[in-house]
Amino acid sequence: MRKIIAAINMSLDGFCDHTGMIADDELHEYYNDLLRNAGVLIYGRITYQLMESYWPSVVRNPTGNKPTDDFAVLIDNIPKIVFSRTLKHVEWKNTMLKDEIIREEIVGLKQQEGKDIFVGSPGLINAFMHLDLIDEYQLAVHPVIAGSGLQLFQDIEDRIKLQLIKTKIIGSGVIFLYYEPDKNAL
């Protein structure tokens, strides 16, 4: 069975904004490795539009920077699901549009053979978390204090205990924290 992995960049103070983070070669290499193990990417409208507005153009007109160009090709070729109530159609290849999260559909997707499923939008990470669908969290904490923006974890009513399973630090100071939900927690 595939895992559903919440993978996202965030500031030290817990805010998510792809434009305010450190996007160097080493970070792109990290995400290239992650994408090589991805069977499906799941985004909300805002993250999808941010990614779709840039990466397909890099595929058509490479930058000359190998990690960036590799990332563009990898993300372009992976099947994507976008959840949105306002989008009426999507242009990016390999992309399916859905307007509602149905837990049983996600569980069915998870039970299919293949590579893992990555969720990369704050709102969807929260929604999947509330539906108890997240098997692993991969949080890339950047050495940036944003001060404001979209918080990753919102509307938490009950404490959710996690178990740290791995860490990784790269040269820019980004720390990757890997957690699994602690199924033995009370």
Image (tube, helix red, strand yellow):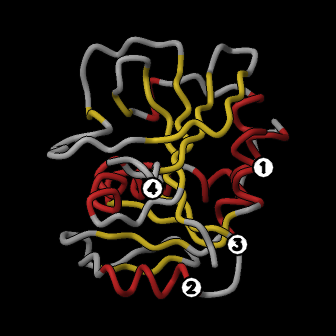
Name the amino acid type tagged 1: Asp
Comparing labels 3 and 2, the label whose residue is closer to the camera: 2
Q: Is mark 2 on a helix, strand or loop?
A: helix
Distance CA(mark 3)–CA(mark 1) = 13 Å
Task: Tell me if mark 3 has few (under 14), some (14-19) or many (20+) residues whose alpha carbon lies within 10 angstroms of its own.
Answer: some
Q: What residue type is labelled 4?
A: Lys
- Give the residue pinned by disc 3: 115
Task: Name the image quarter holding the N terminus.
Answer: bottom right
Q: How far across and how far down the image is residue 78, in percent? A: 65, 70
Nearer-N-terminus badge (2/4)? 2
Tell me residue 154's x, y (percent): 21, 41
Q: Circle 4 is placed at which residue position?
A: 183
| Residue found 53% across the figure and 13% down from its top | 143
- Picture residue at 58% right of the left edge, 33% below the top: 177
Q: Is residue 134 visible?
A: yes
The amino acid sitting under disc 3 is: Lys
Q: Where is residue 91 in the image (x, y as percent from the top left)?
A: 46, 74
Within-10-Å neighbours for mark 2: few <14, some 14–19, many 20+? few
Instruction: Determine which of the numbered discs, if any, sits on residue 111 in the image.
Output: 2
Q: Are marks 3 and 2 in contact (CB under 8 Å)?
A: no
Distance from disc 4 to disc 1, alpha carbons, whole Å, reads: 28 Å
Is 146 situated above or below 93? above
Can you tell which of label 4 and label 1 is closer to the viewer?
4
CA gap, disc 2 and disc 4: 19 Å
Check disc 2 and give the amino acid type. Answer: Gln
C-alpha distance separating marks 3 and 2: 11 Å
